[in-house]
Amino acid sequence: MISVLMTSYNYVVYIEKAIQSVLTQTFGDLELLVIDDGSQDGSLELAQSFAKKDPRVRVIRHSDGGNHGLPETLKLGIANAGGEWIAFLESDDIWEPECLEKRLKRLQYTQAKAVFNAIRPLVMPGADTRWFDSYVPRVMREHTYRIKRGELVQLSSSSLIENKIPTFSCVMLHAELLRQCSLDAPVPRWLDWWIWTQVAQRTAFSFVPEQLTVWRLHAGSYNHRISLLQYIKDNRRLWNGFRRLRTQYWETGKHWETLFLSCPFWVRLLARFYLIAYQSGVRETLRCIQNRIR
């Protein structure tokens, strides 16, 4: 069985289609856990209406009904998940009907314990797509290139430089693998990056090049644009968090990564800008920086 975790906070406009896209999957052996984080816009009641009609849907709330943030809300979902596999779908995104079926087929073929797929953006009125345009297509091209060569996607090194899997909604992991990971992210809004980096220490990812996830970009989307000072502070905090993983890297024989983690945080920033320049040119690098900093 696959447990689908959908964290929810005030997305009543989008959550209905997200839930429907799970319940219409061609792979039916699933449970959908909608974990509400204190919504006050009617999205909780909407999710509960689905639970009354379909026994595969369960709605979970924090004991006090309050807002606790994504890490604590996701912990609650993982604790209640009963499936062998755990997939994530953000409450404003959509899956194509064959999403889970094709992920499972890919996992069976590669014998991997983690899989992700390509993304199709759906730009809605009012969306700011600048950060998306300068980031997501580039990292997806990398994965497509690797898969054409018949390779699994090794992220143990590259995930220390930048987040190579840009959204929860395109990922599925073996449940026990996920439970080995800490969810206490140094920067909560980069929780996905924090998790993928830990997973990458333990296993390679399989990749489905088909666009099975529809990423709805809208006016309320988190657009990742922050001040320069905040960007520097967040990167320092994240890097200090990664450095706590050095012992695990060394024990798994990843000595280059262990050495890299001994460097100051600004070395990672320089490495990322060099990587973008190498892949896309200096002009694209400057555009990426401009789109990140407000």
Image (spheres, rainbow, N blue to C red):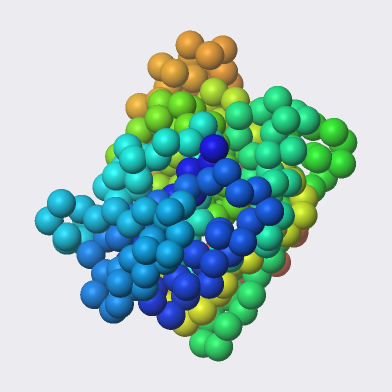
Q: Position of residue 210 (x, y in %)?
A: 77, 54
Q: Residue at x 61, y 29 (%)?
A: 113
Nearer the observer, 281 or 54:
54
Q: Residue at x 61, y 49 (%)?
A: 28
Nearer the observer, 280 or 164:
164
Placement of the C terminus among the 4 image quadrants: bottom left
Is 109 rendered above or below residue 163?
above
Placement of the N terminus among the 4 image quadrants: top right
Is 80 rendered above or below residue 118?
above
Q: Position of residue 92 (x, y in %)?
A: 48, 69
**Is 185 left, or right, of 126 in this rendering?**
left
Is 153 rendered above or below residue 50?
above
**Is 79 left, or right, of 6 in this rendering?**
left
Q: Quadrant of residue 200?
A: top right
Q: Residue at x 55, y 88 (%)?
A: 125
**Is 193 left, or right, of 102 in this rendering?**
left
Q: Residue at x 34, y 40 (%)?
A: 80
Nearer the observer, 101 or 255:
101
Q: Position of residue 227 (x, y in %)?
A: 37, 68
